[in-house]
Amino acid sequence: MEMGRINSLISTSALLWLIFVLENVSIVYGNAEGDALYAFKKQLRDPNNVLQSWDPTLVNPCMWYHVTCNFDNSVTRIDLGSANLTGQLVSQLGQLTNLQYLELYNNNISGKIPQHLGNLTSLVSLDLFRNKLEGHIPKTLGKLQKLRNLRLNNNDLTGTIPYSLTTITTLHVLDLSNNNLRGYLPNNGSFSLFTPISFANNPKLKLPVVVPLPPAPAPAPAPLNS
Ligand SMILES: *[C@@H]1O[C@H](CO)[C@@H](O)[C@H](O)[C@H]1NC(C)=O
Ligand SMILES: *[C@@H]1O[C@H](CO)[C@@H](O)[C@H](O)[C@H]1NC(C)=O
Ligand SMILES: *[C@@H]1O[C@H](CO)[C@@H](O)[C@H](O)[C@H]1NC(C)=O
Ligand SMILES: *[C@@H]1O[C@H](CO)[C@@H](O)[C@H](O)[C@H]1NC(C)=O
């Protein structure tokens, strides 16, 4: 065999080997999660450069600041409270299926809460309080059946409180105060635990209708003693 042919065979197999290795590295959650987070970053204004380390060319986002992963290199936490971020939530965040903590409180995030966040079924804390969120609370959030903390207070949320939230039996801390929610406040399921403090300062929110008990039968007249 002539040299050129051997060389090209060697480089072809080296290339195939490289492809094989890269495929296997990225098969573990690949960079789909990094891509999802980068889609979020791309439309944020970040004057304090807290997202400077979010480099989409890394194999995964696990080395980025404010991101925590599990041993499978899948994202479990985003800690970006009080980070002075301006922008919107993106539907791609719903792809982080092992996410347990989404901490984005006290920023300047506007727009709607994407329905896709209902796909984050590992979520334990959803903390979006003190932002500029508007629109309805998506009823898909009722799919978050491990949620313990749901804090959406101090935004500009409108619409009614979805009944689906009453089915989250793990719910421990609920704060929907200081919004513009309307309609009747659910008081069944997990909501039976929460006091009006959780819903304070939503001027259009109505307390649930209390169905009056039927009047007690009048006591039988006491027999006349002779
Ligand atoms: C937030 O960013 C703005 C610029 O958009 C800056 O003027 C302000 O000082 C920042 N605030 C904090 C607390 O870093
Ligand atoms: C907050 O976001 C709005 C746009 O939604 C922008 O006009 C305003 O400048 C932002 N505020 C700060 C402090 O960055
Ligand atoms: C995530 O949620 C959205 C809206 O709720 C839905 O349309 C979509 O199919 C879901 N995606 C996955 C991967 O489950
Ligand atoms: C609470 O009541 C609403 C409306 O009647 C219902 O859709 C919802 O499933 C109830 N929640 C629970 C936990 O039973």
Image: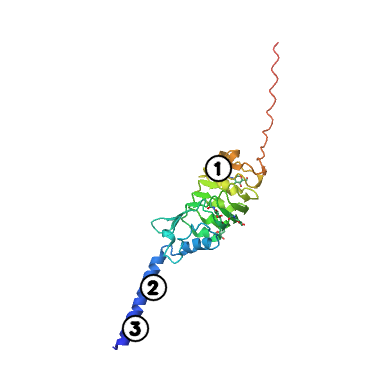
Q: Residues within 10 Å of mark 2 (few under 14, many from 20)?
A: few
Disc 1 on helix, strand or loop? helix
Mark found first going from the N terminus, 3 or 1: 3
**Residue 88 visible in the current orientation:** no
Disc 2 on helix, strand or loop? helix
Rendering coords of residue 127 (x, y %): 53, 49
Rendering coords of residue 119 (x, y %): 52, 56
Whether the residue under disc 3 has CB within 8 Å of ligand 3: no
Name the side, left or right, on which 122 lies relative to 200: left
Looking at the rendered structure, the kind of residue marked 1 is Ser
Residue for badge 2: 19
Disc 3 on helix, strand or loop? helix
Q: Residue at x 57, y 39 (%)?
A: 192
Residue for badge 3: 8
Q: Which of marks 3 and 1 is in front?
A: 3
Q: How crowded is mark 1: few (under 14 residues within 10 Å), some or many (20 or more)?
A: some
Rendering coords of residue 214 (x, y %): 68, 32
Q: What is the residue that sits farthest to the left in this orientation? A: 1
Give the Cα distance between marks 3 and 1: 67 Å
Q: Nearer the viewer, residue 185 or 51?
A: 51
Q: Which of marks 2 and 1 is in front?
A: 2
